Amino acid sequence: MDPIIAVLQILWVLYGGIGFYIIFSSSSIDKEKGYVYTDAEKEADIVAKIKTRDSNFNSDIFKYCARQCVLDIYDHFNRCETQELMPLESTELFNIHKSDIEQGITSKKLNCTVLEEVEIRKITKYKIDGNKEVIGCKAYFTYQNATIDPSSNSVLKYDVNMKKNTMYIEFIKNKNVKHNFSFALNQCPNCGALIEVNAQGICIYCDSSLINGEHSWVLNKVEPFIDKM
Ligand SMILES: [Zn+2]
């Protein structure tokens, strides 16, 4: 064999290998944050799975509503508006937030996250868990930390530095409810009255439960995004 051709063949194999390495490694790296993920790559597959249960599902509308839901929740939390939080959250998350707010009022000190922006990046998880439908998303939070005194409505501490974090947010809904696009309820779906709930999340007019995703998507979890390889 011509030595020049042999050298070219070696180089071709070498460069081919490097090329493959670059293609495969870059596909699993989120360049902006440097996180390596596998699940998020398959958003189209996940959405297709959701559509087999609900053909009207639209991921863009879901993400738009999910973003608004998260912004509203943090806003209500920072204002200690417990009653307004209730229809937006699962019972589990609501109980945590309610207890945080109560402790904040008692101690005159509440740690708050002031959300500047929430970007819902991708739907990364979908499953049926008992009678619940679960959708998980990867999101970027831009925020500032603050400590307030709820009793006097004053700011005790305010961090001017804007922070950014990649978060996992999870929504749940009764799997038999098809209202996929509704997050915050304005009206009771059972009796039509404007939402007014008691401390247990029961409509004061017709006694139907309006929390824990019984009628619409509610936020169930917010935690740092961890890649599961
Ligand atoms: Zn009602």
Image: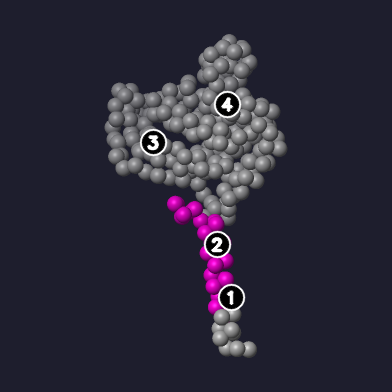
Q: Please, what is the dominant secondary structure of the magenta stretch?
A: helix
Give yes or no for contact between labels 1 and 3 (Cβ–Cβ under 8 Å). Answer: no
Q: Quarter of the image holding residue 189?
A: top right
Residue drawn at (58%, 50%), measured in percent from left and top?
41
Could one spot residue 92 in this view of the protein? no
Q: Distance from label 2 to label 3 (Cα)?
A: 35 Å
User: Which numbered disc flags the more N-terminal residue, 2 or 3?
Assistant: 2
Residue drawn at (66%, 38%), measured in percent from left and top?
50
Local crowd size for mark 3, using a 10 Å CA cut-off: few (<14), some (14–19), many (≥20): few
User: Which numbered disc flags the more N-terminal residue, 1 or 4?
Assistant: 1
Q: Distance from label 1 to label 4 (Cα)?
A: 54 Å
Q: Amino acid at mark 2?
A: Ile
Q: Quarter of the image holding residue 173?
A: top right
Instruction: Check residue 13 in the rendering and tell me which mark sits there, or answer none.
Output: 1
User: Which numbered disc flags the more N-terminal residue, 2 or 4?
Assistant: 2
Of residues 39 and 111, the one nearer the viewer is 39
Residue drawn at (53%, 31%), measured in percent from left and top?
65
Read off the magenta span.
10-35
Of residues 59 and 130, the one nearer the viewer is 59
Is 146 on the left-hand or right-hand side of 19? left
Read off the residue under disc 2: 23
SS type, badge 3: strand
